[in-house]
Amino acid sequence: MRRFYFDHNATTPVSPEVLAAMLPMLGEVYGNASSVHHFGQMARQALDEARKHVAAMLDASPEEIVFTSGGTEGDNHALFGVARTGHAITTTIEHPAVLGACDQLASATRVKVDSRGIVDPDDIRRALRPDTKIISVMHANNELGVIQPIEEIAKVARQAGVAMHSDGVQAAGKIPVSVRNLGVDSYAITGHKFYAPKGVGALYLRKGASISPLLYGGHHERDRRAGTENVAGAVALGRAAQWIVEEGAAEWAREAALRDRLEHAILHRVRDAHVNGAGAPRTPNTTNIRFDGIDSDALLIALDLRGFAVSSGAACSSGATEPSHVLTAIGLTKQQAKSSTRFSLGRANSIDDVDALVDAVAASVAHLRKLAPAYA
């Protein structure tokens, strides 16, 4: 049976060009980038080149890029590095990497979003307190794909004299990102969302921004992140970023057309289906659709049996018994939230794949509804 992957927001496969760039770093360029000898300097050169590529993708300077283990570390570094003893402002739909970190701070305010999943910058302003040290709002939501007005929120932060952080994990590699235009002080990304391997990411730290280290030890990453650098991972991240700079715009347009085709076809063929987050700006590859009368876990299994990998929510919350906090935050009931499924497209998906998925969804929903006597 052929298998189709429509869960790219959870993770992406390592692309051929990324794998080709990474492999020599494992077997040939194996020196410690802090060593002064030939082998170390080869690694340092590769690390510096990767840093340039990541910076180019984010419209940053290379010295503003800190390599990390991924988005969770980046978010934690930004929050703990600025507001460990202060007040933070975030939203109700953030990733657990931000919400969990905020729970460990002295205090934090979670600002509500509207029915589309958008936060009002004025609500952020109203949440400011004298002890507020940081505002943290994700650039794009992992479940809905909804894009937040980060530039406007960053202006609120600047006017208040507090730091502005954005979790860019679901935005980087999917939409154009200019940290300069956004006006953020820090911005976290992770490689496995755009065809680099898991376990490597980067944190943009604006030059001049004040932040304490999260990890202590050696003088790596300009004293901002202790620990021997993952050169192979950084090179992979850099190559993935280079591909985005060169090919991203065309791929985003292609995926947007596929996503729209998927949505329109499902809404046409399946009654009582609704797009969560409709009407808001969204990343081009993501749609979250609610099927009334259907349990999303049952639909996920039914589609998997037909060869289609989709998601009932964030991969980090897999197995949770409670409905998605993102979907309930936009006003859905628990039952509606548990009736929603996320489809996230990627580079390997084609028109034929999308049409096959529509057929599978229509057949699966019809079958499951027949098994649900409460559904009329």
Image (cartoon, grey):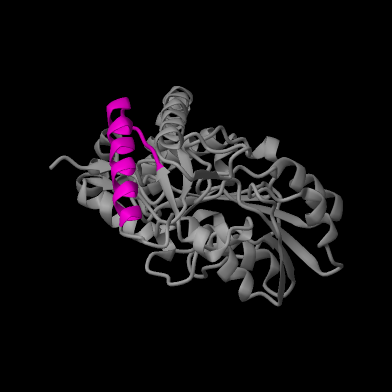
Residue 227 belongs to magenta span:
no
Snapshot quadrant of residue 194: top left
Left or right, 215 with respect to 347, comes to right
Q: Where is residue 111 shown, x and y percent of the image?
A: 72, 61
Q: Which residues fall within the magenta stretch?
A: 344-370
Q: Residue at x 44, y 54 (%)?
A: 376
Q: Residue at x 86, y 50 (%)?
A: 159
Q: Residue at x 48, y 63 (%)?
A: 226
Q: Residue furthest left?
A: 1
Left or right, 248 with respect to 83, comes to left
Specify whether residue 32 is in view.
no
211 or 338: nearer the eye? 338
Snapshot quadrant of residue 327: bottom right
Q: Where is residue 341 shown, x and y percent of the image?
A: 42, 51
Q: Where is residue 21 shown, x and y percent of the image?
A: 29, 37
Q: Where is residue 192 shown, x and y percent of the image?
A: 38, 48
Q: Residue furthest top?
A: 250
Q: Residue at x 35, y 42 (%)?
A: 236
Residue 359 belongs to magenta span:
yes
Snapshot quadrant of residue 222: bottom right
